[in-house]
Amino acid sequence: MAVDVGDLAPDFELKDQHGTPVKLSSFRGVKNVVLVFYPLAFSGVCTGEMCALRDQFPEITRDDVELLAVSVDSFFVLKTWAERDHFNFTMLADFWPHGEVARAYGVFDDKMGVATRGTFIIDKDGVVRWKAVNPIPQAREIADYQKALAELS
């Protein structure tokens, strides 16, 4: 079942790249969340997208925005990738149960066993205000995230 604009975002708790649990609902009332699902660490398109978020998405330095990047990789893999490529944002491991959070958001590809490129902008009340789902080989446009966040301000 897919999550749509206007829905309350399904809550979850996943480990970040340091093994620390992060709960989506902990940002309620404090930050808008940019929730970005991607297939796999170290893959070409995913690396390009994460580098673009690092380099071209200054919104992640704002006090009212939190970027959460989610894949089915283990947090050990995410830690290595984040250190190698200097990703200073939260990377979450939807490792076990495998893809459970991606499934809850309707962006898990059962055939490939990974998330598709789903993005959800969640406001401070926990409501999905914008979403885009791209096929696995198609990178997303950061300008779309920026426009959606600007509309929340």
Image: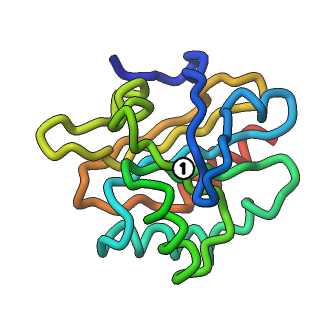
Q: Is residue 76 above or below residue 136?
A: below
Task: Determine the residue positioned at 83% across, 58% down.
Answer: 62
In the picture, residue 2 is in which quadrant? Answer: top left
Q: Quadrant of the C terminus?
A: top right
Image location of residue 80, percent across then percent down: 50, 74
Q: Secondary structure at mark 1?
A: strand
**Residue projecting furthest to the left:** 111
**Residue projecting furthest to the bottom:** 84
Residue at image mark 1: 92
* Amino acid type of the residue tagged 1 in the rendering: Leu
Of residues 140 and 65, the one nearer the viewer is 65
Image location of residue 26, percent across then percent down: 77, 31
Task: Determine the residue positioned at 55% across, 35% down.
Answer: 130
Task: Determine the residue positioned at 60% across, 23% down.
Answer: 11
What colour-coding does the image apply?
Answer: rainbow
Circle 1 residues within 10 Å: few <14, some 14–19, many ≥20: many
Task: Determine the residue positioned at 65% across, 52% down.
Answer: 67
Image location of residue 37, percent across then percent down: 43, 47
Image location of residue 39, percent across then percent down: 32, 54
